[in-house]
Image (cartoon, rainbow, N blue to C red):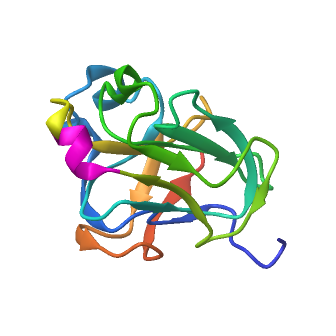
Amino acid sequence: MADFDNKLFFAPMTGEVLDLTECSDPIFAQGIVGAGVLFLPRDSKVYSPCAGKVSIVANGRHGLAIKNPEGFQVLIHIGIDTVDMDGDGFKTYIKVGDEVKPGDLLLEFDLEKIKACGKSIQSPVVITNPAIKKVERLSTGVVNYGDEIFRICEPK
């Protein structure tokens, strides 16, 4: 894993990238969970944005986190309030402790089912380490999974 830039993260899904402040959930919008970006997914697959170890898989399979070799943890949260769906429409391919590399398929979700349940498809991707207050966005607009999405800005 030493071949990877551990401050660079790739788009975990295909979709539109927005500023995190546009998230309808104030906990994400205010950066309380962490610094990152907001996705509006255009398909139903989530891929690893970095090399690392799976550290969290939500019981409802709507979110997961990966800790990379440098100790940065990235959280991928599919939809807003999708925890209420109790895993219906979500399928994971990984478990806590699994080693992953960029581009590995982690999760699939049913975009139409999320919408039909009245949930937002807004999907925050954030670095949860409290010391990280900012990321440098490398892409805007519509991106494909695997595109460079952001780089961590270290505290001074």
Give the quadrant of residue 78.
top left
| Prevailing SS of the magenta stretch | helix
Q: Position of 73 compared to 114: left or right? A: right
Q: Can residue 118 be seen in the rendering of this structure?
A: yes
Q: Quadrant of the N terminus?
A: bottom right
Q: How many badges with numbers are in the image?
A: 0
Q: Residue 94's x, y, as percent?
A: 68, 52
Q: Nearer the viewer, residue 30 or 111?
A: 111
Q: Which residues are magenta?
A: 110-115
Q: How far across and how far down the image is residue 145, in percent?
A: 42, 72
Q: Above or below — where is 148 with respect to 61?
A: below
Looking at the image, which residue is at 43% across and 76% down? 147
How far across and how far down the image is residue 53, in percent?
77, 51
Q: Is residue 121 visible?
A: no
Residue 77 against residue 43 in the figure, above or below: above
Residue beneath the point at 25% across and 39% down: 114
Residue lying at the far front of the rendered structure: 88
- Going by the image, does 29 lie left or right of 50? left
Residue for point 79% across, 79% down: 3
Quarter of the image with the C terminus in it: top right
Look at 40% across and 35% down and name the residue there: 88
- The foreground one among 83 and 5 is 83
Does residue 61 sit above or below 98 in this rendering? above
Q: Position of residue 107 (x, y in %)?
A: 52, 54
Can residue 23 be found in the magenta stretch?
no
113 sits left or right of 75 in the view = left
Whether residue 58 is situated above or below residue 51 in the rendered picture: above
